Image (cartoon, helix red, strand yellow):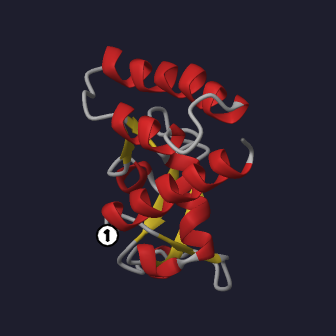
Amino acid sequence: MGLDVTERVKLDRDGVNEMCAPAPDSPLAAFLQGSVPFYIEFYERYGSSDGASMHDPLALAIAIDPSLATLQTTRVEVETDGTWTRGATVTDLRGSAAARGRPDGCPRTTRAWRIDVDAPAFMTRFVERLAALVEACA
């Protein structure tokens, strides 16, 4: 998942409170209340007041349920020579890499890239599943 997709999905303090509500005194709720606000505060220090991006959880959720995002199969390569882009992933959305002499058979991958993600559906599932886990671990 590209950051342009995962940064559209934010967990805020209300979401954390909702996760912990089934068993607020449980060890898992205490862990979530103690650790997740730190992550949210990191984002606030750098200008995001709407919560913390859910990069890894969203990527995992889309691997389980691809209907959460609009996906496109495309060539993705890691830039290794660029001065400003070294280590960045480069996605060929136009399919033109072959026309520029790229070898046939380059690996292709499915990736959500500047497309769309159903952020409300993901957040509802994410919060509900963690709330159920908090309750089960109480």
Q: Residue 19: where, in percent of width, then height?
A: 50, 44
The answer to whether 105 is drawn above or below residue 77 in the figure is below
Q: Residue at x 33, y 68 (%)?
A: 118
Q: Which quarter of the rendering shows the C terminus? A: top right
Viewer can see residue 1:
no
Counting the numbered discs, the total is 1
Q: Which residue occupies the extreme top position in the image?
A: 45
Q: Residue 36: where, in percent of width, then height?
A: 53, 28
The answer to whether 36 is drawn above or below residue 70 in the figure is above
Q: Residue at x 55, y 38 (%)?
A: 86
Q: Residue at x 68, y 35 (%)?
A: 28
Determine which quarter of the picture holds residue 93: bottom left
Q: Residue 2: where, in percent of width, then height?
A: 46, 55
Q: Residue at x 48, y 46 (%)?
A: 54
Determine which quarter of the picture holds residue 68: bottom left
Q: Which residue occupies the extreme bottom position in the image?
A: 104
Q: What residue does disc 1 label?
A: 115
Viewer can see residue 34:
yes
Q: Residue 78: where, in percent of width, then height?
A: 60, 53
Type of the residue with mark 1: Ile
Determine which quarter of the picture holds residue 92: bottom left
Element on which disc 1 rests: loop
Along the line of sight, the residue nearer the viewer: 111 or 27: 27
- Mark 1 Cα shell of 10 Å, populated few (<14), some (14-19), many (≥20): few
Along the line of sight, the residue nearer the viewer: 125 or 107: 125
User: Horizontal placement of 98 versus 87: left or right?
Assistant: left
